[in-house]
Amino acid sequence: MLSEIRFRVVRIFIAMGLLTFVCMSLGVSLINLNGYEMPTLHIDTFNNLSVQIISLLKNDLIPNNVNLVQTAPGQSFYAQLYVALIVGLVCALPLIYREFIAFINPALYHHENKVIKKTLIPMILLFILGCVFSYNIVIPYTLEFLYKYGQSIEITSFFEITSFVTFTLNMLVVFGFSFQIPIIMWAITKSGLVERAFWKNNIGYIVIFLIIIGALLTPDGSGITMWFITIPLIVLYIAGLAVIRFDSMLPIIDQNQR
């Protein structure tokens, strides 16, 4: 069993390593082909994919009149490396999922295996939706809110590059995974590990737990910005309750249609 675990982990790390290398060594440029602009990859260490992603984050998310700065040698490189590692991890998630399922498959019952196989595409879509929601709503409003603290006392605001990049990417990944809450709740219930009533009966405890998670993930200690994280988590939990309830009603609907 240990040899199988090692084999699967090595495959995952090789994939992540290759993807990280691609982000640090290749860049994307547009070429004109018969009047159409086509994206192409080319070797470019100083304008690689990581640099282009950081430029996109900077242009889209940083409030006006705020500068992105490097306060020590190497911070820009470490920020690029962090971006490449996160991109490698995210792009390798389907492989990680596949290797994990292949490893535990012999221990699963047939109905549990069917439930898990149904979750792959919804999980990918929800991960993308979580990243989009975070990128367009949560991160801009959070950064704008924190920026106004400095603006209120008329000081010049700077965002240090490594802090900005790690905060932004961590928020994207956190929301990508947090949007899996409805699928996880459905899969756990469907596999029979808990009863449907468990989620409703323990809603108070789970909401408190989600508030604690939001507080831990908050970039400042104001107690206000944590609600930018906590409220979406609570909404996702309620969505999970709705998914479980709808799934429990499907046999009744099918029976009535017959």
Image: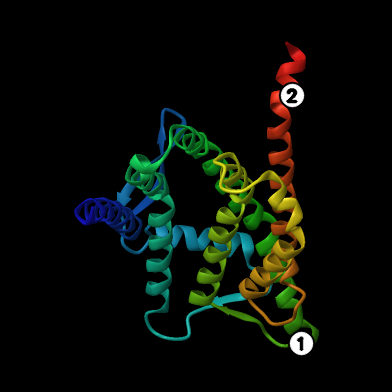
User: In the image, what residue occupies the spot 67% across and 55% down?
Assistant: 136
Q: Which residue is mark 1?
A: 154
Task: State the residue in front, 89 or 162.
Answer: 89
| 41 to 117, vertically: above or below | below
- Element on which disc 1 rests: loop
Would residue 175 be seen by someone viewing this image from the given angle? yes
Res 147 → quadrant: bottom right
User: In the image, what residue occupies the spot 74% across and 81% down?
Assistant: 222
Where residue 159 appears, as percent x and y from the top left, is 58, 78
Q: Is residue 227 left or right of residue 11?
A: right
User: In the image, what residue occupies the spot 60% across and 57% down?
Assistant: 175
Task: State the residue in front, 36 or 186.
Answer: 186
Measure the alpha-carbon separation of dots 2 and 1: 63 Å
- Dividing the image into 4 quarters, which one contains the C terminus? top right
Q: Is residue 193 left or right of residue 182?
A: left
Where residue 2 appears, as percent x and y from the top left, is 22, 57
Camera-side mark, 2 or 1: 2
Q: Which residue is mark 2?
A: 252
The first of marks 2 and 1 along the sequence is 1
Amino acid found under the numbered disc labelled 2: Ile
Q: In this view, which residue lies farthest toward the right?
A: 152
Q: In this view, which residue lies farthest toward the top?
A: 258
User: In the image, what residue occupies the spot 51% across and 62% down?
Assistant: 55
Res 150 → quadrant: bottom right
